[in-house]
């Protein structure tokens, strides 16, 4: 059995069940936010949720091998349509609020938010 220091963020956050629940709540929040919901107007949300679950599992050190686009390529069309820092911040806040709602420990929320922050330049393409 692994000791706590050997567990991945994915394991410490609660594994598949926790990631899946977080993604579902996260997108409920996103689709209610007038600032960002328009970016998802022509998106197959069922597919989007599955891609996001796979990506977060990968990003958190889980057992899925993410084979989707890199962050810059995946967001290029959105950036061309106006995605910028205020949108990135809103999405990050929704993720943080989702994790808090789910009762994720503050230190793990902080770790997730550091990871999210590290993706800003890749997502926005600069």
Image (cartoon, helix red, strand yellow):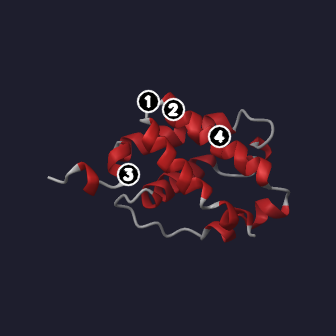
> Which one is earlier in the sequence, the residue at label 1 or at label 3?
3
Between the residue at mark 4 and the residue at mark 1, the CA separation in whole angstroms equals 15 Å
Q: Which mark is residue 93?
A: 4
Which residue is painted at 44% across and 41% down in the image?
Answer: 107
Q: Position of residue 126 (x, y in %)?
A: 75, 70
Q: Please give the residue where the numbered disc 1 appears in the rendered image.
A: 103
> Which one is earlier in the sequence, the residue at label 2 or at label 4?
4
Between the residue at mark 1 and the residue at mark 3, the CA separation in whole angstroms equals 15 Å
Q: Position of residue 68 (x, y in %)?
A: 54, 68
Graded by Cα atoms within 10 Å as few (under 14), some (14 to 19) or many (20 or more), the crowding at tag 3 reads many
Contact? badges 1 and 2 (CB < 8 Å): yes
Q: Please give the residue where the numbered disc 3 appears in the rendered image.
A: 10
> Which one is earlier in the sequence, the residue at label 3 or at label 4?
3
Which of the pair 31/79 is nearer the observer? Answer: 79
Graded by Cα atoms within 10 Å as few (under 14), some (14 to 19) or many (20 or more), the crowding at tag 1 reads few
91 vs 125: above or below: above
> Which one is earlier in the sequence, the residue at label 3 or at label 2?
3
Residue 69 in view (yes/no): yes
Between the residue at mark 1 and the residue at mark 2, the CA separation in whole angstroms equals 5 Å
Graded by Cα atoms within 10 Å as few (under 14), some (14 to 19) or many (20 or more), the crowding at tag 2 reads some
Q: Is residue 106 left or right of residue 121?
A: left
Between the residue at mark 3 and the residue at mark 2, the CA separation in whole angstroms equals 16 Å
Which residue is painted at 76% across and 48% down in the image?
Answer: 87
SS at mark 3?
helix
Which residue is painted at 19% across and 54% down in the image?
Answer: 2
Q: Please give the residue where the numbered disc 2 appears in the rendered image.
A: 100
SS at mark 1?
loop
Contact? badges 1 and 3 (CB < 8 Å): no
Which residue is painted at 27% across and 53% down in the image?
Answer: 5
């Amino acid at each position: 059995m692994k000791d706590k220091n050997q567990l991945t963020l994915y394991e410490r956050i609660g594994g598949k069940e926790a990631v899946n629940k977080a993604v579902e709540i996260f997108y409920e929040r996103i689709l209610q936010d007038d600032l960002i919901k328009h970016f998802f107007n022509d998106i197959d949300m069922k597919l989007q949720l599955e891609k996001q679950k796979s990506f977060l599992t990968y990003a958190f050190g889980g057992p899925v091998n993410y084979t989707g686009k890199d962050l810059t390529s995946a967001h290029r069309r959105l950036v061309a349509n106006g995605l910028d820092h205020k949108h990135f911040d809103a999405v990050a806040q929704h993720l943080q609020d989702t994790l808090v709602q789910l009762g994720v420990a503050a230190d793990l929320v902080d770790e997730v938010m550091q990871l999210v922050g590290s993706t800003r330049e890749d997502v926005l393409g600069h």
